Amino acid sequence: PEVPRSLPLGALAVTIYRVDFSYRTRGDTDEPPVLHGVSAHIPAGQQVAVVGETGSGKTTLGRLIARLADPTAGTVSIGGISLTRVANSDLRSRVTVVPQEPFLFEGSIAANLSFARPKLSLAELETAIDALDLRDWLDTLPEGIETEVGQRGGQLSAGERQLVALIRASLVDPAVLLLDEATSSVDALTEVRLARALEKLAKGRTTIAIAHRLSTAARADRVLVLDHGRLVEDGPHSVLVEAGGVYSRMYQSWVASTSTGGQGTLV
């Protein structure tokens, strides 16, 4: 058997090459493909948003980049090495996933952060919070960093659970950060805090956001637009808005929904 390879040091590029993916059923027939011939190269350090309507395949693409599944055809590579050849321990230490619903266990915020770096002191954990410019959020909590999160983080909002997960990700110090945004509504202040924290965390890292809010796409260096499993547009937000295609229509619809008081979320 082939010996697993270690990823190169430093920031890592991500390459998706002619990727197809199908969820196979138990019977002889397969489900229709979820992704068809998707190719994209994401240079090291670039911040990318992946967008699309429900069922476009954006979350599936995120799963493949994290190697939570393998493509039916084609390859996903990180640092020039196919994920099927990367040592699993190396992948988990260099690629960090912040899922829609991060796992928090019952206990304090500090205990949940210590899961990433058990030997850090409370002061060092608070330094990590300050580094992501989240002191104003911490100061609103009844017990600060010792605030209990409840079972599965139930005493925090969906957005606050993602804040804890971003702080935890910063402690791991990954080369590639994959964020699948929470689909449940996030209040305006928490969204500002999430954006601020992500901006700090993304510096020097390859960052891929499966974006359910187009405000995230607008801030990215580049937007990948999926439609029915195909990559149909790829470029900066401003260029795609002017192009009048799929992304432009999505963006105009999002602007209209937010101006009438909606959350503008693409589930």
Image: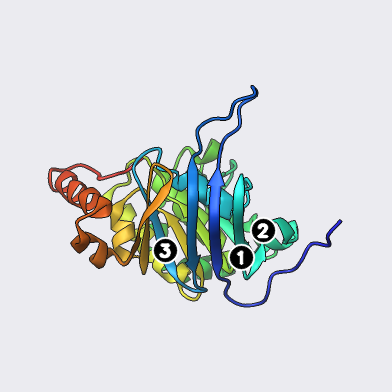
Q: Which mark is residue 220?
A: none
Which of the two labelled residues, at mark 3 and mark 1, occupies the earlier sequence position? 3
Dot placed on the residue nearer the N-terminal end, 2 or 1: 1
Q: Is residue 28 visible?
A: yes
Percent position (x, y) of residue 218? 29, 62
Q: Nearer the viewer, mark 2 or mark 3?
A: 2
Residue density around tag 2, few if under 14, some if 14–19, many if 20 or more, within 10 Å: many
For badge 3, the amino acid type reads: Val
**x, y percentage for residue 123?**
56, 68
Separation of residues labelled 2 and 3 (CA atoms): 19 Å
Precedes in sequence: disc 2 or disc 3: 3
- Quadrant showing the N terminus: bottom right
Q: Pick out the residue farthest to the top.
A: 27
Q: Is residue 259 above or below residue 197?
A: above
How crowded pointer 3 is (Cα within 10 Å; few <14, some 14-19, many 20+) is rated as: many
Asked if marks 3 and 1 touch (Cβ < 8 Å), the reply is: no
Is 45 in front, or is 113?
Answer: 45
Q: Is residue 122 visible?
A: no
Residue at x 60%, y 42% (from the top left corner): 105
SS of the residue under disc 3? strand
The label shown at residue 83 is 2
Name the residue beneath numbered marker 3.
48
Residue under the image location 32 percent in, 42 percent down: 185
Which residue sits at x=34%, y=42%? 53
Spatial CA distance of label 2 from label 1 is 7 Å
Labelled pair 2, 1 in contact (Cβ < 8 Å): yes
Q: Which residue is mark 1?
A: 78
Q: Disc 3 and disc 1: Cα gap in Å? A: 15 Å
**Of residues 78 and 211, which is closer to you in this image?**
78
Q: Secondary structure at mark 2?
A: helix
The three-letter code of the residue at mark 1 reads Ile
Disc 1, SS: strand
